[in-house]
Image: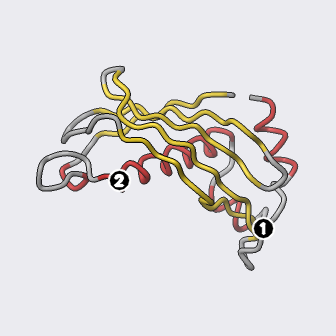
Amino acid sequence: MSAFIWQVRVYYEDTDSGGVVYHSNYLNFMERARTEWLRHLGFEQTYLSDVLKVMFVVHSAQIAFKKPAKFNDLLIIDSALGKIGRGSLEFLQKIYVNQQLLVEAVIKVACVDADTFKPSAIPTVIKVKMEQI
């Protein structure tokens, strides 16, 4: 497993009326971290869809909420790549604030054809780069 760390600040728009992060926004933070991880590897989303003709879509998610994040917190999203399948990836993602675990999730993403949305093998160029880390 290899980890990628990304930070995001909690804005007022991310919170509910109680001043804590609304539960679905954690999924948004994790999505952004996975996108930044791909960018770090050299793969922009537009390159994936326009050139390689693939997209990664969420297949399933298991999420455990431990503690709430609040307005203005600086969150650390730790994304570790677990399993690499023929056409899927499994991530273990954790969200922290001040080294305290807030959320833990297992996110499985599937590779699909960008035009048909049918399952597709992960392109070799991407898989090789992922296996190197």
Compared with residue 60, is residue 42 higher up or lower down, i.e. above or below?
A: above
Name the disc covering residue 25, or none.
2
Horizontal and vertical percent for residue 59? 63, 60
Compared with residue 55, is residue 1 higher up or lower down, i.e. above or below?
A: above
Could you give the CA–CA distance between mark 2 and mark 1, rounded to whole angstroms? Answer: 27 Å
Compared with residue 133, is residue 33 higher up or lower down, i.e. above or below?
A: below
Horizontal and vertical percent for residue 47? 69, 59
Horizontal and vertical percent for residue 90? 67, 44
Please tell me which residue is depicted at 35% across the width and 53% down the height of the picture.
Answer: 25
Please tell me which residue is depicted at 78% across the width and 67% down the height of the picture.
Answer: 119
- On screen, residue 3 versus residue 102, left or right, reads right
Name the disc covering residue 119, or none.
1
Crowd around label 2: few <14 · some 14–19 · many ≥20 (10 Å): some
Q: Nearer the viewer, residue 42 or 93?
A: 93
Compared with residue 60, is residue 20 higher up or lower down, i.e. above or below?
A: above
Question: Which callout, 2 or 1, points at the residue further toward the start of the chain?
Answer: 2
Please tell me which residue is depicted at 66% across the width and 59% down the height of the picture.
Answer: 56
Q: Nearer the viewer, residue 10 or 48?
A: 10
Residue pushed farthest bottom?
116
- On screen, residue 69 versus residue 49, left or right, reads left
